[in-house]
Amino acid sequence: MWSVNWRTLLQPAQSLRRTVTTAVLSNTQQPATKAADPLQPVYLTLSSLHGKKVKDQAVALDPTVFNHPIRKDILHLCAVHYLDAQRQGTACTKTRGEVRGSGRKIRPQKGTGRARLGDGQSPMLRGGGVAFGPKPRDFSTKLNRKVIEMGMRVALSAKLKEQRLGVVRRLRWYCPKTRTLKRRLDLLGWMTGTLFVTGESQVNPALRLAGRNLPGVDFKVADDLHVYDLIKWRRVVLDVSAVQALEQRLSKGWVDVVEEPAVMQSRSTLPLLQSTSTESGSAELQ
């Protein structure tokens, strides 16, 4: 009969457990920092509302805003959320307790051979109440802010990939005549289904007066832009200030690795570049 020292047998396992615990604690105390992935900017050729030549100039767009993966489910959620909030919910009908009239029983319960009836406010009678009719209610639904922001990124990226997104320097017009603006938009192909978005506090008065009678054109400020607007309108034209406002609101931060020194400037200035590559976005919107 021989005896076993269990402490001697368990000593290697205990030392291994102590080593693993120390490693786990060291990892928790010093979390690894994740380096930001370098992303290439998206270039888009500038357009011009006044007919000036800007073919050699392009704008650098934030890839986290204008090059987001397409998510149709997110677009659907944002569109339903916006349309639900637009419903008034004021439909109202009267129940049998709200209809004006006497509560006297119309005829005796028995003896007439006809159907039994109560008062004249019964839903079965003409002029009576409505059973299970609509009442004023709130149709708005809740959707998280981050989902709405993702929907804006997806919608802008989809417009850019479809070549239905344009950028101009400024959304200004020189006169309030509808005829002159219509002639210019017909020349550019922007007459049908075009939404103009500016980053200023209000739309240029002359431009609004000139385009308010055009059925296929609308104007908005960047603060009032919704995901549903980007889905509804066939073509979207932004000015530089609108691009800056959208990037400031929706940007997730990115590291620029392009060699051009102009792109390395501050993102708040939104540099205008001399486009020499054929991969730049086309300003000829479909």
Image (spheres, rainbow, N blue to C red):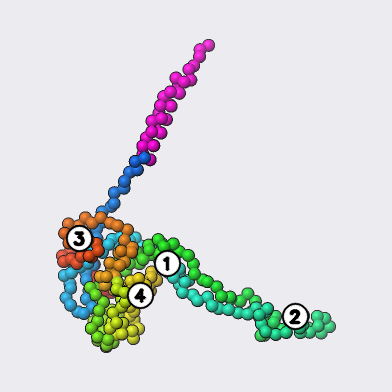
Question: Badge 1 local density, few (<14 within 10 Å), some, or many (20+)?
Answer: many
| Residue 20 is inside the magenta segment | yes
Helix, strand or loop at label 1? It is: helix
How far apart in space, not on screen, are marks 4 and 1 (Cα)?
Answer: 15 Å
Contact? badges 4 and 2 (CB < 8 Å): no
Q: How many marks?
A: 4
Helix, strand or loop at label 4? It is: loop
Helix, strand or loop at label 2? It is: loop
Upstream in sequence: badge 4 or badge 1: 1
Q: Quadrant of residue 193?
A: bottom left
Which residue is under mark 1?
78
The circle drawn on residue 233 is 4
| Residue 158 is inside the magenta segment | no
Of residues 166 and 268, the one drawn nearer to the viewer in this rendering: 268
Residue type pointed to by label 1 = Cys
Question: Residue 120, percent across and down?
Answer: 71, 84
Q: Residue at x 70, y 85 (%)?
A: 101
Question: Badge 3 local density, few (<14 within 10 Å), some, or many (20+)?
Answer: few
How far apart in space, not on screen, are marks 2 and 3 (Cα)?
Answer: 82 Å
Judged by depth in the image, the label closer to the viewer, 4 or 1, is 1
Q: Residue at x 31, y 85 (%)?
A: 209
Residue 147 vertical position relative to residue 4 in the rendered view, above or below? below
Which residue is under mark 2?
118
The circle drawn on residue 265 is 3
- Highlighted range, magenta: 1-28
Question: Residue 199, percent across and down?
Answer: 30, 72
Residue type pointed to by label 3 = Gln
